[in-house]
Amino acid sequence: MDYINDTCGILVDPTTPEGFINGLSAAMIKLATDSELRKQMGRAARQRVVDEFDWQRKVDRTLQIL
């Protein structure tokens, strides 16, 4: 399971070192200049943690795997 997706973060494809640096720079500039996007992603990230990463869900998932 991925920790972030496009609702709560900006995914940067690390195909080359230069591409990764450029993608990361663009993502940081986008977040720095768009306060609504920051708020929206922050809310989505919090909800994702509540929905996917609480301890009971981890225990349930581990039991499924075992």
Image (tube, rainbow, N blue to C red):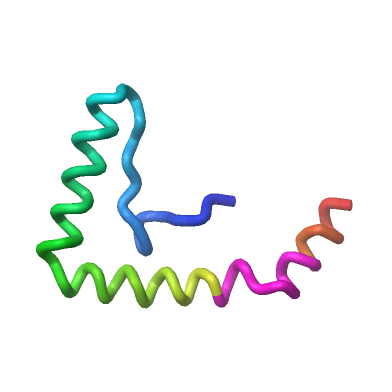
| Camera-nearest residue between 61 and 14 | 14
**Segment tinted magenta in the rendering:** 50-59
Tell me if residue 60 comes above or below residue 1 in the rendering: below
Q: Position of residue 29 (x, y in %)?
A: 14, 53
Q: Is residue 53 left or right of residue 60?
A: left
Q: Residue at x 10, y 63 (%)?
A: 33
Residue 22 highlighted magenta (yes or no): no
Q: Residue at x 62, y 68 (%)?
A: 53
Q: Is residue 10 left or right of residue 63?
A: left
Q: Residue at x 42, y 55 (%)?
A: 5
Q: Main secondary structure of the magenta part?
A: helix
| Residue 20, image quadrant | top left
Q: Position of residue 22 (x, y in %)?
A: 19, 35
Q: Position of residue 12 (x, y in %)?
A: 32, 41
Residue 53 highlighted magenta (yes or no): yes
Tell me if residue 22 comes above or below residue 11 in the rendering: above
Q: Residue at x 24, y 34 (%)?
A: 21
Q: Is residue 62 left or right of residue 37?
A: right
| Camera-nearest residue between 8 and 29 | 29
- Circle count: 0
Q: Residue furthest right?
A: 66
| Residue 54, image quadrant | bottom right
Q: Residue furthest left?
A: 33
| Camera-nearest residue between 64 and 3 | 3
Q: Position of residue 18 (x, y in %)?
A: 23, 25
